[in-house]
Image (tube, grey):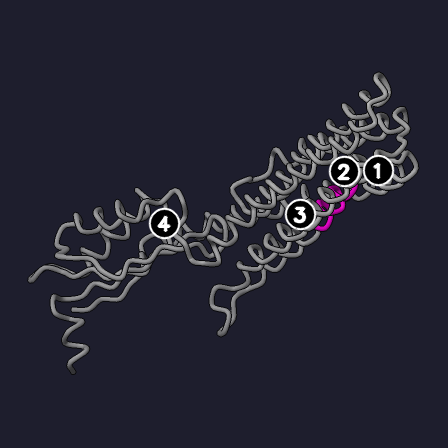
Amino acid sequence: MAAGGHDHDHGHHSHDHGHHHAHSRIRDERRLFATLLLGVAYMGVEAVGGWLTGSLALMADAGHMLSDAAALGVTLFALRMARLPEDHRRTYGYHRAEVLAAVVNGAALLAIGVGVLVEGLRRLGQPTEVQPGPMIAIAAGGLVVNLIGLAILSGADRSGLNVRGAWLHLLSDSLGSAGAIVAGVAVWAFGWGWADPVASLLIALLVLRSAYMLLEECVGVLMETAPAHIDTEKLRARLIAVHGVASVHDVHVWTITSGMISMSGHLVAAPGQDAGAILQAAAACLRDEFGISHSTIQVEPEGFVEDALHR
């Protein structure tokens, strides 16, 4: 009576979906690569410009762009890794490489954010001479490059951890460039030397915020936390409501990598109920109502666990 099983009737559907998914992933990779090249090209300009004009806000923005470039590089590597086939030991393949990459990403952002914060506070105490004209011009160029990057990525699938990570990087980068422009104008128009370190502090806070958001999500995946949009109590209640189910136990919902949700659980069948029918109904419910197409469901007779333990 114990029927271990998977939702078998959607094999064709998931294959089509997988094929489409692979295509969109390759398109996303191309978008990420184009953004990476743009960012790397301009990052050098900002770093040298920041050094020559004495602007910490520009240097902060260049550091930010460096972290973006590293992040995108790691992301592309992870997306390539995720395409490797699974083997007898790595039965889920290399999908988690994406999450590990996002952790590296988040950690790099944190380090840069803290570094800029410390330097910004130091400079508030002793403002340095800044050349506002070139600073404004370079920051404006940075803003344009970031906006082009955002335009390229806006067509990509942002439900993935990595594409969204890259999008967050670019968005906070754009705000950083805007901050550097405002600081440059303040120094130029009013001679406010403190505007530059203040802008760099705001950029640092932006960086730290996006790092925190990214790391929080990664930790959730690595701790096998149920995805935020799935109410596990509601899911259990729906499974108990399936015709022929007496009770439900050992329900687990987790994420393999962003967008890939798995579920496993044991359903106890009421006496005289057909295990196959229960399996079909439960798998269909998970797929249609919760969007979980990778489910492993064990249907067992009442008293099955106790029997197994006392055998």
In the rendered image of this protein, does residue 14 appear above or below residue 146?
below
Q: Residue at x 66, y 56 (%)?
A: 77
Label 4–label 2 contact, CB within 8 A: no
Magenta-drawn segment = 62-72
Q: Going from the N terminus, do you reach mark 1 or mark 2 first?
A: 1
Q: Distance between the residues labelled 1 and 3?
A: 18 Å
Q: Label 4: which residue?
A: 292
The quarter of the picture where the N terminus appears is: bottom left
Q: Nearer the viewer, residue 290 or 194?
A: 194
Residue 18 position within the rendered picture, expressed as x and y whole percent measured from the top left? 48, 51
At mark 4, the secondary structure is loop
Give the labeled residue for mark 1: 46
Q: Specify which label sits upstream in the sequence, 1 or 3.
A: 1
The image shows residue 302, relative to residue 213, as above or below, that is below
Q: Which amino acid, mark 4?
A: Ile
Q: Is mark 2 on a helix, strand or loop?
A: helix
Residue 67, magenta (yes or no):
yes
